[in-house]
Image: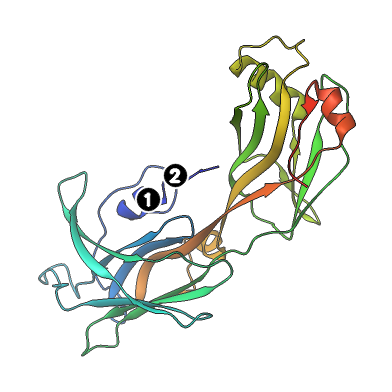
Amino acid sequence: MNILPRYIALLMAGCVTLTACENTIEPFDQEGDTSYVIHGILDMQLDRQFVRIEALRPTVLSQTQDMEDVRVFSTDLDGGQLIFWNDSLVTLDDGSSAHLYYADFRPVEGHSYVLQVGRSDETGASATTKVPERPVFYLDPTRGDTLNLKQKIYLVDIQEQPKQLTVQYTVVDVDSEVPQTIDIFYGEAGSSSSIGWEFDVRLATDRFIIMGILNRSIEDKNVRLRNLGFSLTIESEEWTRVLDPVNLNRAYGFFGSVGHYEFFWRLDSQSIVTMGYVDDQTFN
C-alpha cells in the first residue's frame, strides 16, 4: 500500500490542517524573543524531508530578513545522526517566494529529532518531534453471516484517530494466476475506546466492491483470497497541539512527524468460505 498524505503541500502553504489556509506567513516578531517561523513535517515514508522557514522581522517597517547565512540542521537524538539541510527558493501559488529546506533521510520509527535553525552569531531557534511508534494490534473473531460478515480490529494505546485507513485485499481472479491487490479506503473510520482505537473490517461489504471491480457475479465462489491487510497513518502528538505548540523554542509555526504502517493477518478458513472466496492465503 502506498498511501501518501499531502503533507508537503500543507507545509508549503504554511498550515497543517486540511481546511482553507493562506500561503502568507506574517514574519513579524511581536514578542521580541522569537527568531523564525518553522513549518515542517518529518515523514517516514519519504526519502527526502522538507521544512519551510522564514526569518521574523522586529516590526512591520523593518526590512525583510536575509536567509543567506542561516544554517539548518537536524539531530537524531536516539541514533546520533547529524544532518545539514539544503536551502531552495521556491515560488508559491500566489507568486511569492519561500525558503524550503530539504535533507535526504528517512526518519526512524520511535526516534526523536531536533531541528535547529540560526546563524553562527545568534541563539537561533529549535523544534523537536518524536516519530510515532508502530502500534500493536489484535483482532476479535469474525461475526455475522455472508451478507454482513465483519471483524473488529483494536490498535492498542492509540487514542487519536488514525488517518488514511485503507484495507487491502490481494485476490486471484478466476482462470488467472496473477494476484491483484485492491485497496478499499476506509478514511477515518472507527472510534476511541479504553483499549485504544477500534474499527470494523467490513468483510462482506468489501467483497461486493471487489467482485464489482473484477466484473464478477457476487454468486461466483471461485475467486481466491491471497492476503488481507490494512495500512494507516499516525500523527505525532504535536498534531493535537497545533494552536498551542510546546515543542518550539524561539519559533512560531508547526513541526511534527507522521508514521505510516502496514499490517497483515491470516483469516480463518471458515470465514473465507462464508465470504465466498477460496482460501489461498500465503501469510502465516
Where does residue 26 sit, x and y in percent of width and height?
25, 61
Dot 2: what SS?
loop
Q: Secondary structure at mark 1?
A: helix
Q: Residue at x 42, y 56 (%)?
A: 46
Please state, as top left, top right, bottom left or bottom right, where the N terminus lies in the image.
top right
Q: Is residue 260 or residue 269 the one in the foreground?
A: 269
Q: Which residue is mark 2?
A: 18
In the picture, residue 147 is in which quadrant?
top right
Tell me: 191 left or right of 111. Answer: right
Residue 250 visible:
no
Residue at x 66%, y 42% (from the top left corner): 230
Q: Is residue 194 above or below residue 142?
A: below
Query: Where does the image place residue 61, in percent across and percent down from the top left?
Result: 11, 69
Q: Position of residue 187 (x, y in %)?
A: 59, 38
> Which sits earlier in the primary sequence, circle 1 or circle 2?
1
Picture coordinates of residue 202, whole percent (x, y)? 74, 30
Q: Which residue is denoted by mark 1 in the rendering?
A: 10
Residue at x-position 29% and y-position 48%: 22
* Amino acid type, residue under disc 1 in the picture: Leu
Q: Residues within 10 Å of mark 1 (few under 14, many from 20)?
A: some
Marks 1 & 2, CB-CB < 8 Å contact:
yes
Residue 190 appears in which quarter of the rendering? Answer: top right
Q: Nearer the viewer, residue 149 or 235?
A: 149
Looking at the image, is 224 positioned above or below residue 218? below
Residue at left offset 12%, top offset 72%: 62
- The amino acid type of the residue labelled 2 equals Leu
198 and 175: which is toward the camera: 175
